[in-house]
Amino acid sequence: MQSAEEKGTDANGRLIMAKLADGEDVFSSLHEVAAVHKIESGAVLFGIGMLKDFEIGFFGPEGYVKHAYADRHELLGFHGSIAMRAEPKFHIHVAVAAPDHSVLGGHLFRAKAAVVNEICLARFDTIKLDRKLNPTTTLQELQVSY
């Protein structure tokens, strides 16, 4: 990952661009970016590049049905919420394309950057995000306060 000095931010420091190199762990890299840029609440606005060694899931009646993929897939969509005081800290959904151009997607559980990733994050200064267990859905659902 680029050093803190190489990461781009906007004039107010609320938009952050991060570039991940081949093989970097996506979630640990995002945690580092959040710490460097003091993101407690925010959003993953977009990401492009490729992923490899990733696991995605679909939330069904019995919980998440997960599938792991080792090969590189083109990253078509990458977005979610950031709540650093909660678990999960990052709630990210992805859409990826295989070499035959078939598309699959879901909740991202783990991933490594393949070739390169360009990811844009937004820091919220007045919106506070947290998560709370909803016993009906069994999910740690987003809580928003101002």
Image (cartoon, rainbow, N blue to C red):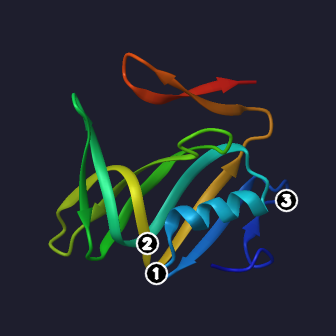
**Residue plotted at (37% across, 16% down):** 136
The residue lying at 45 percent from left, 56 percent from top is: 78
What's the distance in space between the residues labelled 2 and 1, CA to CA?
5 Å
Q: What is the three-letter code of the residue carrying label 1?
A: Gly
Q: Which mark is residue 112?
A: 2
Where disc 2 sits, the SS reads strand
Position above or below: 37 against 106:
below
Q: Nearer the viewer, mark 1 or mark 3?
A: 1
With 64 as the anchor, is 19 left or right in this view?
A: right
Quadrant location of the N terminus in the rendered image: bottom right
Cα–Cα gap, marks 2 and 3: 30 Å
Q: Is residue 66 left or right of residue 3?
A: left
Disc 2 residue crowd, few under 14, some 14–19, many 20+, Cα 10 Å: many
The residue beneath circle 3 is 11
Please name the residue that numbered disc 1 is placed on: 23
Vertical side of 94 occupied by 86: above or below = above
Horizontal and vertical percent position of residue 55: 32, 59
